[in-house]
Amino acid sequence: MRRARGFTLLEVLVALAVVAIALGAGLRAAGALTDNAERLSEVIAAQWCADNQLTALRLSRAFPGVGDADFSCEQLGRSYRGTLVTRPTPNPSFRRVDAVLLDDAGHALVTLSTVLSRQ
């Protein structure tokens, strides 16, 4: 009597289960990469907005007063809202200015800081 060669049904089912688990993990990793790329794009655009606001302050050569000021900006087809937070420093000739950009939920996407001097 000759014995048949090949895989048993159980071996085929185990192989299919391993492949299904591996494909599921691959899909989950691909989804995480897509989410991270989208978040990175959003943070970079928000950083450009913050940098533009701080550069405009530097170019105006005006010594900012202490307080908060809201602003909005558009980058890459998205609108961002932010706040310029100006605080005193121990040296009265300098001010610290933070540009804080928020996402739609009100969480900080990026905070960029600079120190401006009295001219």
Image (tube, rainbow, N blue to C red):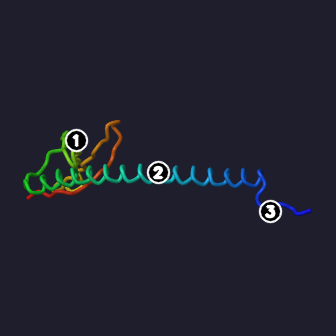
Question: Disc 2 designates what residue?
Answer: 32
Neighbour class for label 3 at 10 Å: few (<14), some, many (≥20)? few
* Distance between the alpha carbons at the discs numbered 2 and 3: 43 Å
Question: Disc 3 designates what residue?
Answer: 5
* Distance between the alpha carbons at the discs numbered 1 and 2: 24 Å
Q: Residue 27 vs residue 100: left or right?
A: right
Q: Nearer the viewer, mark 1 or mark 2?
A: 2
Neighbour class for label 1 at 10 Å: few (<14), some, many (≥20)? some
Mark 1: secondary structure: strand
Give the residue drawn at x 62%, y 50%.
20
For marks 2 and 3 on the same chain, the one whose residue lies earlier in the sequence: 3
Q: Residue 113 vs residue 21: left or right?
A: left
**Where is the N terminus found, in terms of image quarters?**
bottom right
Give the residue drawn at x 67%, y 50%.
17
Neighbour class for label 2 at 10 Å: few (<14), some, many (≥20)? few
Q: Among all residues in the image, which is located at the extreme right? A: 1
For marks 1 and 2 on the same chain, the one whose residue lies earlier in the sequence: 2
**Where is the C terminus found, in terms of image quarters?**
bottom left
Q: In the rendered structure, which amino acid carries the disc numbered 1?
A: Ser
Q: In the rendered structure, which amino acid carries the disc numbered 2?
A: Ala
Question: Disc 1 designates what residue?
Answer: 79
Q: Position of residue 99 (x, y in %)?
A: 24, 49
Give the residue drawn at x 44%, y 54%.
33
